[in-house]
Image (cartoon, grey):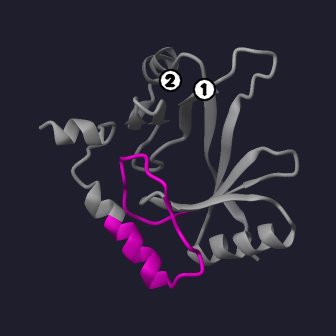
């Protein structure tokens, strides 16, 4: 039976992305690992080689009485087979799947928990990808096809350094 083997990261909606990045980076000493300032997303890690991000800051926190603070809660599973099994169990229990994605460094299944919180089970693929990406994936594909898709994403983004952006690489 598959199980969660660790908390991967928490995604928080924020109002002032720059201020929050400065807090986590400068005050807490975390490192920016991935960013898409234009899209309003910055990922940070206390140990990028152990976990490419533990905090995801996403612009878009509402100003009203409904604070909508949590973007997502992500939990790591050990194997691709575990991810597939959790996906099947999510469907069997009638939970709403939001999307299945390939992030390069991980493949994930996003769904809504019983109270509507976005939750992700993800499998760490092995190689690091420092670009925030999330291409659709079909978990019914063969292991070889899924790994090939991972390798395509890694190859496409290999020139983007930790904390860099595609835009910065394009202007070099």
Residue 138 at x, y = what percent?
56, 73
> In the rendered view, does 142 fall on the left or right side of 153?
right
Which residue in the structure is indicated by mark 2? Answer: 24
Q: Secondary structure at mark 1?
A: loop
The tag on residue 60 is: 1
Mark nearer the N terminus (2 vs 1): 2
Q: Residue at x 40, y 71 (%)?
A: 149
The answer to whether one can see residue 109 in this image is: no
Q: Is residue 141 magenta?
A: yes
Q: Secondary structure at mark 2?
A: helix
Q: 42 and 26: which one is in front?
A: 42
Q: Residue at x 26, y 44 (%)?
A: 161
Q: Is residue 52 magenta?
A: no
Seen in the picture, residue 74 relative to 127 is either above or below; the reply is above
Magenta region, residue range? 123-152
The answer to whether one can see residue 76 in this image is: yes
> In the rendered view, does 24 fall on the left or right side of 14?
left
């Amino acid at each position: 039976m598959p199980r969660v083997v660790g908390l991967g990261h928490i995604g928080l909606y924020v109002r002032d992305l720059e201020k929050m990045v400065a807090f986590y980076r400068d005050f807490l000493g975390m490192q920016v690992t991935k960013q898409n300032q234009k899209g309003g997303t910055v990922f940070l890690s206390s140990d990028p080689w152990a976990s490419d991000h533990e905090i995801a800051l996403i612009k878009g926190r509402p100003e009203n009485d409904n604070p909508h603070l949590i973007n997502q809660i992500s939990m790591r599973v050990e194997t691709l087979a575990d991810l597939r099994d959790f996906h099947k169990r999510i469907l069997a229990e009638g939970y709403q799947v939001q999307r299945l994605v390939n992030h390069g460094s991980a493949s994930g299944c996003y769904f809504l928990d019983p109270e509507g919180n976005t939750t992700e089970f993800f499998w760490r693929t092995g190689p690091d990808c420092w670009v925030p990406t999330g291409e659709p994936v079909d978990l019914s594909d063969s292991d070889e096809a899924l790994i090939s898709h991972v390798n395509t994403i890694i190859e496409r983004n290999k020139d983007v350094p930790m904390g860099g952006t595609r835009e910065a690489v394009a202007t070099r």
